[in-house]
Image (cartoon, helix red, strand yellow):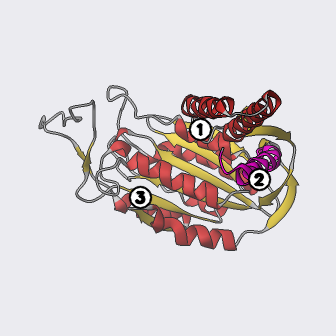
Amino acid sequence: MITKPIIPVFVALPVLLIILCLYIAVILKRHTRIRYKILGVLRIVAIIFLVFLINLRIMSKRYNATVEMKNLDVLFVVDTTMSMWAEDYDGSKTRMSGVLKDTEYIIDELSGSNFGLIRFDNYAQVLCPFTQDHETVKDAFSTIKMPDRYYAKGTSLNTAYGEMKGLLESSSTKEERQTILFFISDGEITDNSALKTFKDLEPLVDAGAVLGYGTEKGGKMQAGTFYYIQDSETYKDAVSVIDEGNLKRLADDLQIDYIHMGSTANVKYLVESIKDGSSLTMEKSDSVSYEDTYFLYVIPLVILLGIEMALFIRRGHL
C-alpha cells in the first residue's frame, strides 16, 4: 500500500489533534455519568481517526489489472538543451515549464495509451520506453533538469534520430496500433550542423505534431539566482530565439502538424482528434496500478457523524 495525503500529514495531524483535545475537554465538563463521557470520547476518537485515514488516501496496489486501453503508442521526443530554459513561454515562464505542463495534459487526455520518452541535448537518451504506467512516464519527465552551461556543446535536432527510429520501429511492428509522435523543441541549431531529412521515419508515424516553443523576440536563460547566461562574443545576456523554419521542415518530413505552443490550448484540437481516431480494448496492464480505499472509511464515518448529529439535536448542545 502507498499513501498520497490530500492535506500534508504535518498540517492535518496537529489540526485534528487540537480538535480532538477541545472536543474531549467539552465532553469531560458535561454533568453526565462517566460511561456516557467514555462513550463520547470513544466516538470522537473514532471520528478523528477515520478522518485522518481518509486524508491519508491509502491506495492498494493492483498487479496485471484489466484496464481500458487505447490502441495508441505515444512517443515524446524532447529537446533538453539549454535554450529550452529561455524565459518566453506564456509571458516570462521557461519553455521547459510549458513543455512539462503541456505533456502532462497530453498524457492525461490520452490515458490508456502506451507512452515513451526520449530526451536529447549533447546526446539522445531513452528515458522511458513504451509503457502503460503513466506515473512512470511523468516521473521520467520530472528528472529533466537544465544542463550545466559548461556541459552544453550546442544544439542539433539530428541527435535524436537514432533513438527515434528504434522506438518508432518497435511500435510499427505491433498489430492494429497507431504510432503518435510529439517532437518538442525550439528549433535552434547552434552546432553548425545542417538539419538532416527525417523522411525515412514518416512511414512509421501515423499522427502527431512538432511542437515549437519560444518566440521571435526570444528569451534570456537564467544561469543563477541573479544573473543570466551571457553571449561569449558580446558579453551581454544571451537571447534564444525560436527557429520555426527548422521545425516546419521537420514536420513536413514526418507529414505531421506543426504547432507553435504559447499555451496548452494550442494542442487541444489535435489531442481531441487523436482521441476520436483511437479505439478502446480491455487488456491486462503490464504495470502496477493503485486503487483508492478511502470509501472503506467513509461509511463508518457517516454513521458516526449521524449519531453525533442525532445526539446534538436531542441534547441541544455538544
What residue is drawn where x is 49% and y is 52%?
A: 101
Q: For residue 296: magenta? A: yes
Q: Which amino acid does the dot numbered 1 rest on?
A: Ala
Circle 3 residues within 10 Å: few <14, some 14–19, many ≥20? many
Residue 1 seen in this snapshot = no
Q: Earlier in the sequence, mark 2 or mark 1?
A: 1
Q: Which residue is mark 1?
A: 140
Q: Does 14 appear above or below 7?
A: above
Q: Which quadrant holds the N terminus?
A: top right
Spot occupied by residue 252 in the image (x, y as percentages of width and height): 49, 67
Q: Nearer the viewer, mark 2 or mark 3?
A: 2
Query: Any mark on residue 212, and which?
Result: 3
Magenta range is: 291-317
Judging by the rendered image, the residue that carries numbered circle 2 is 310
Residue at left 72%, top 36%?
44
Relative vertical location of residue 134 with respect to residue 70 in this rendering, above or below:
above
Other residues around mark 1 within 10 Å, as few (<14) / some (14–19) / many (≥20): some
Place of residue 263 in the rendered image (x, y in percent of width and height, measured from the top left)? 41, 62
Tags 2 and 1 in contact by the CB under 8 Å rule? Answer: no
Q: Is residue 282 visible?
A: yes
Identity, as a three-letter code, of the amino acid under mark 2: Ala
Residue type at tag 3: Gly
Give me the C-alpha separation between circle 2 and circle 1.
51 Å
Nearer to us in this view, 55 or 24: 24
